[in-house]
Image: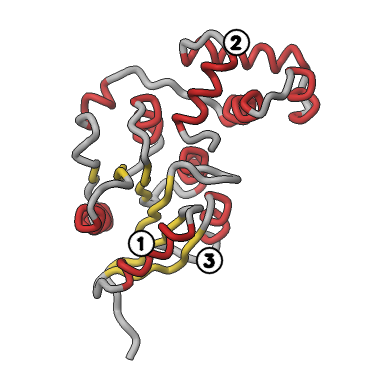
């Protein structure tokens, strides 16, 4: 007999053990069904062409397309789609970015499974749910939000890979002058002053591994 689930979700995480364990535990629930197990944001976006989940539960730090980048695309192409982020980070910048993009919940990976289930059910029911370890949502939203464009995020990744402005320009098919302008804007927005600080930010925010 086919099970009639109340909620259908997608789970995306590039760590296979975590993905399998979380899926197995959710599978034991009578009201929640895992439609697909995915490994990055690109797979999430591809899956949405055929499946309509009640909620996407995804890791922030994934390869190919991370959680922050995926939220950018969801906000643009599927603005009604509910999504929750799992993370080990608590940087205010990242939290503000995610909330600005319409994320419905953020949970730390060291949270209990019961708390995670509560978050899933709460968000699927139409509410928001943020980990108790986070700052109050209203105070986060009240701070000035730093907005990075998709192009700036690409440049941050390439700088973190150690590429020069000339190589980045060739990679993105733009001029070296444009690359340097983007770099200046990024440094100004993030209040950083050198490449080392930029790499540290990229790692802490989940833009790179």
Residue at 24% across, 75% down: 30
Q: In whole angstroms, how far apart are the C-alphas of marks 3 and 1?
A: 23 Å
In terms of secondary structure, where does tag 3 sit? loop
- Point out the frontmost of discs 3 and 1: 1
Q: Residue at 31%, 67% (x, y): give it.
A: 26
Which residue carries the number 2 mark?
184
Whole-number angstrom distance, CA of label 1 to CA of label 2 = 41 Å
Rendered image: mark on residue 22:
1
Compare residues 165 and 53 and report the one nearer the observer: 165
Q: In this view, does 191 lie above or below 46?
A: above
Image coordinates for residue 62, horizontal then vertical, percent: 51, 45
Query: What residue did someone put label 3 on?
Result: 50
Position of residue 47 in the picture relative to residue 4 (left or right): right
Element assignment for label 2 = helix
* Position of residue 101 measured from the top left corner of the image (x, y, whole percent): 41, 36
Viewer-closest of 91 and 71: 91
- State the residue in front, 155 or 52: 155
Q: Earlier in the sequence, mark 2 or mark 3?
A: 3
Q: Are the two marked residues, 1 and 2, in contact with CB atoms closer than 8 angstroms?
A: no
**Residue at far front of view:** 17
Q: How crowded is mark 3: few (under 14 residues within 10 Å), some or many (20 or more)?
A: few
The N terminus - image quarter:
bottom left
Residue in view at x 22 percent, y 49 percent: 127
Residue 205 rendering spot, x and y as whole percentages: 45, 31
- For the point 76% across and 23% down, which residue is it? 169
Please tell me which of labels 3 and 1 falls first in the chain: 1
């Amino acid at each position: 007999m086919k099970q009639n689930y109340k909620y259908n979700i997608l789970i995306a995480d590039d760590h296979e053990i975590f993905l399998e364990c979380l899926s197995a535990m959710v599978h034991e629930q009578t009201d929640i069904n895992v439609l697909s197990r995915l490994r990055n944001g690109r797979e999430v976006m591809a899956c949405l062409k055929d499946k309509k989940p009640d909620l996407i539960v995804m890791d922030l730090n994934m390869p190919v397309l991370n959680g922050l980048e995926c939220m950018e695309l969801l906000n643009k192409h599927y603005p009604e789609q509910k999504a929750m982020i799992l993370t080990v980070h608590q940087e205010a910048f990242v939290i503000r970015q995610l909330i600005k993009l319409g994320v419905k919940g953020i949970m730390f990976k060291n949270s209990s499974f019961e708390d995670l289930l509560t978050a899933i059910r709460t968000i699927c029911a139409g509410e928001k749910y943020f980990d108790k370890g986070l700052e109050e949502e209203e105070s986060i939203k009240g701070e000035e939000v730093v907005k990075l464009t998709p192009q700036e995020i690409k440049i941050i990744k390439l700088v973190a890979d150690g590429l020069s402005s000339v190589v980045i320009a060739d990679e993105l098919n733009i001029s070296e002058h444009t690359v340097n302008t983007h770099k200046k804007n990024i440094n100004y927005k993030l209040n950083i002053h050198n490449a080392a600080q930029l790499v540290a930010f990229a790692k802490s925010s989940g833009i790179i591994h």
